[in-house]
């Protein structure tokens, strides 16, 4: 079964500090992609970062980096220098066997 | 990046009526589009995979006669909620993949449609 697990329903972080959001995945597809999306209260899914299963290096996109540990099947998102505007729901997802599988999400609150 | 639009962005309808939601890829062609439903404070649940020129593939537990999907062209898929009831009230999101890209990265989401059935 294809499964994405996010074990942190909610997280708090102080503004300007870094935060790590956890994600583990389980797939039997050897070729897959891992994504992180931000969903603010407006509902739109905002793409943050992507890691391909064959990528050797961890992906980075500005303040976002993905800590990809293939053997452990984990794909944690690291947000550096948190900003108040980072407060939102964050979803980890895998794309394999031509479908997306989403985790249950983590609600991040950035405190001033 | 590529853009996917949805129309309408929100809709309120009476119980028993049908509602059509459109999903368009504006600057790329998509042989495959996906429809999701998201209840408040929950994750996205895949409802069906919409394939251009063929029948949609529905996930287990999704009634295909209630949620009609049509993928008439490479840029348009529609989801029709037939005989809507209050329990169908939800946030519906579509996504599309750029068929010309060899990368799994090229996936794009629409902004969503909020459906309220009275």
Image: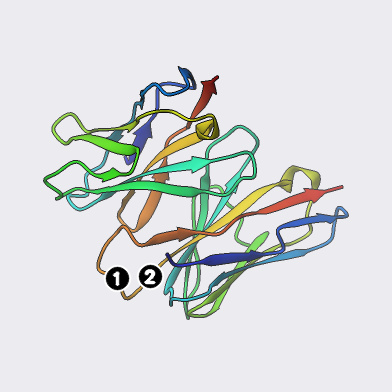
Q: Are circles 2 and 1 on residues that touch, CB within 8 Å?
A: yes
Disc 1 secondary structure class? loop
- Residue, x 65% and y 35% (percent of image)? B40
Q: Within 10 angstroms of label 2, few (less than 14), some, or many (20 or more) residues?
A: many
Q: Identify the coloring.
A: rainbow
Q: Is residue B41 left or right of residue A48?
A: right
Quadrant in which residue B9 is drawn = bottom right
Residue A11 lies, in percent from the top left, at 47, 19
Quadrant in which residue B78 is drawn = bottom right
- Residue, x 32% and y 41% (percent of image)? A2
Residue A64: which numbered mark, if any? Answer: none
Quadrant in which residue A81 is drawn = top left
Residue B98: which numbered mark, if any? Answer: 2
Q: Is residue A57 above or below residue B28?
A: above
What is the CA distance from the residue labelled 2 to the residue labelled 1? 6 Å
Give the residue at mark 1. Answer: B101
């Amino acid at each position: 079964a294809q499964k994405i697990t996010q074990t942190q329903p909610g997280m708090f972080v102080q503004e300007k500090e870094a935060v790590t959001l956890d994600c583990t995945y389980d797939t039997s597809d050897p070729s897959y992609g891992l994504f992180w999306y931000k969903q603010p209260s407006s509902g739109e899914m905002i793409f943050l970062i992507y890691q391909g299963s064959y990528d050797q290096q961890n992906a980075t996109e500005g303040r976002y980096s993905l800590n990809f540990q293939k053997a452990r099947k984990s794909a944690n998102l690291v947000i550096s220098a948190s900003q108040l505007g980072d407060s939102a729901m964050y979803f980890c997802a895998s794309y394999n066997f031509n479908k997306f599988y989403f985790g249950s999400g983590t609600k991040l609150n950035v405190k001033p | 990046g590529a853009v996917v639009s949805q129309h309408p962005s929100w809709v309120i309808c009476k119980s028993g009526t049908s509602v059509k939601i459109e999903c368009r890829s504006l600057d790329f062609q998509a042989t495959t589009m996906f429809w999701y439903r998201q209840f408040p404070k929950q994750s996205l649940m895949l409802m069906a995979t919409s394939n251009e020129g063929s029948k949609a593939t529905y996930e287990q537990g999704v009634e295909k006669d209630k949620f009609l999907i049509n993928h008439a062209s490479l840029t348009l898929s529609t989801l029709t909620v037939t005989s809507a009831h209050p329990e169908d009230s939800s946030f519906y999101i579509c996504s599309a993949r750029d068929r010309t890209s060899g990368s799994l990265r090229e996936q794009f989401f629409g902004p969503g449609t909020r459906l309220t059935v009275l």
